[in-house]
Image: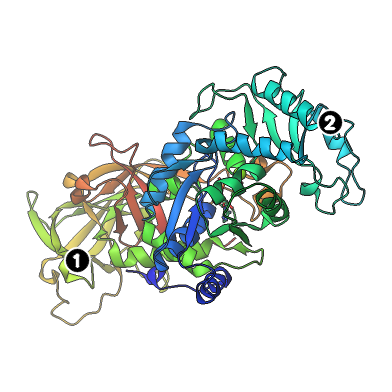
Amino acid sequence: MTQAEHRPTNFIRQIIDEDLASGKHTTIATRFPPEPNGYLHIGHAKSICLNFGIARDYQGTCNLRFDDTNPVKEDVEYVESIQRDVQWLGFQWNGTVRYSSDYFDQLHAYAVELINKGLAYVDELTPEQIREYRGTLTQAGKNSPFRDRSVEENLTLFEKMKNGGFKEGEACLRAKIDMASSFMVMRDPVLYRIKFADHHQTGDKWCIYPMYDFTHCISDALEGITHSICTLEFQDNRRLYDWVLDNISIPCHPRQYEFSRLNLEYSIMSKRKLNLLVTEGIVEGWDDPRMPTISGLRRRGYTPEAVREFCHRIGVTKQDNTVEMSALESCIREDLNERAPRAMAVLDPLRVVLENMPEDHFEEISIINHPNKPEMGSRLVPFSREIFIDRADFREEANKQYKRLVMGKEVRLRHAYIIKAERVEKDAEGNITTLYCSVDRDTLGKDPADGRKVKGVIHWVSAAHALEAEVRLYDRLFAVANPGAADDFLSTINPQSLRIIGHAKLEPSLRDAKPEFVYQFEREGYFCADSKLSSADKPVFNLTVALRDTWVG
Ligand code: ATP
Ligand code: MG
């Protein structure tokens, strides 16, 4: 278990502690309420860890409720992916999945109750006029001419709305609160609007749909939620949350608490904008390994433990802030350093012939899978007269800082022999095509007998046995730290966010790599087989994260 499982403390947990101590509550009920209009991102993971983590630590419950009041933007694909992502993160909701649309009948009845109390009216201003009448932050709004309709007239018109007697935008139901309120949300907010759209859960039963602010508080109350936790942009909406619950006959009144949302550098946390990356074809889908979505991180090789640890480290406060990408990357790096078996892969292969090896030489070298975890066992790696090393690991000339292979000098092949560079063969353009070396056969797993010191170690793969693979190297998806602030965030895409290496040479044991299971390619970074693109015929590996934080931004 990583540190994420340590019980965190934050202002919301302090409130819960007080509520339990005072006897206000004896059990704690939270919920995670995504709108199924996109895939979950790392910001949602923060909210999931908070809500489900509280339920776990207080032996309470956490519901998964789809806030599905806008059928036009929603889809079952999202409903399904969200459930998958929550479970992958390691959480299980209380009972069955819930939907705000489960409560459409009750919500309708509460709307009728508000009309009967003279607290809601059918407005026939156009959406544009409604905006105009609302006023501004510095200027009070003005009442709609339809505001003082009788209860009977409102009941009839609301029924007409429900029965499809109005076109979209011709009428809506509004709460009658205060057009001069300093809180814009309290200026007679719309409670119901007309949408002739089929709903993924309720089909064509309704052509009126309740608004978020009306739906959310009632759904919370119907489920007996004790602490309704949301992000800071809903701070003002708390007035409306309380107003609705205070004015309908419902026995439960959950309390809303707000925390600051996660912002991540070089990234975007808005489903709407992430959707645009998908529909514009800038990425290969919601689960593209460059996406900050949970499914993208997963495909990239992130583990649920690392994501939870990240959420633990960033904590929960009311201060707006932006977290550095390196904070997320160090969580996955630390986790994988422990968990990932080591393997050898040559990304930019240079053919090396070991001239003093017999033509038919073949042996299998036993190599440990993890330097400090003998329990992870070992594997046999073939070694032969022709191998590949990385082009960057050889130079014809170099100064002392260069600790790899130099012409006329020696280097150790990782887990194998010491070799010496003797001569090169070049093509017409002067590129090295083959490097010829000699090998000291008496150095397998031991230092040279004559005491000479060989410092450098490079990795290698036997040429005849190598598994050829495509390797995908990822960089930040955006070239600027705060792409969300740009007028056109699509113009801030990093054109080098994906680099494809077509013909990497991998040690043959990687043939059995399971998708999303991460290996450390020694001296290169952490990589996993791609869950969608990789096949036996054409293995494809994704870079999860580099070995070190090499970003110089
Ligand atoms: P987006 O702008 O990405 O669509 P949203 O808030 O509209 O986000 P919802 O599906 O409504 O998305 O979010 C479900 C829950 O996740 C809400 O309680 C919301 O406050 C929380 N949440 C969304 N984004 C973040 C974030 N960046 N950090 C923390 N919590 C978040
Ligand atoms: Mg939303």
Name the image quarter holding residue 546.
Answer: bottom left
In the displayed structure, 421 sits above or below 275; it is below
Mark 2 surroundings: few (<14), some (14-19) or many (≥20) residues within 10 A: some
Location of the N terminus by quadrant is bottom left
Q: Earlier in the sequence, mark 2 or mark 1?
A: 2
Mark 1 surroundings: few (<14), some (14-19) or many (≥20) residues within 10 A: some
Q: Nearer the viewer, residue 136 or 395?
A: 136
Amino acid type for the residue under numbered disc 2? Arg
Residue 65, percent across and down? 49, 45
Residue 93, percent across and down? 40, 51
Query: Is any atom of residue 196 visible in this view?
Result: yes
Q: How many marks?
A: 2
Amino acid type for the residue under numbered disc 1? His
Q: Does dot 2 land on a helix, a strand or a loop?
A: loop
Q: Identify the residue at horizontal 40%, vertical 64% (top origin).
A: 56
Query: Is any atom of residue 416 visible in this view?
Result: no
C-alpha span from label 2 to label 1: 85 Å
Does the numbered disc 1 mark a residue whose Cβ is under 8 Å from ligand 1? Answer: no
Horizontal side, residue 100 vs residue 423: left or right: right
Q: Nearer the viewer, residue 17 or 502?
A: 17
Name the image quarter holding residue 441.
Answer: bottom left
Location of the C terminus by quadrant is bottom right
Horizontal side, residue 106 vs residue 136: left or right: left
Q: Which residue is mark 2?
A: 149
Q: Which residue is mark 1?
A: 415
Residue 533, percent across and down? 34, 36
Horizontal side, residue 370 vs residue 293: left or right: left
Q: Identify the residue at horizontal 49%, vertical 53% (top origin).
A: 31
Q: Identify the residue at horizontal 37%, vertical 48% (top origin).
A: 95
In the displayed structure, 531 sits above or below 373; it is above
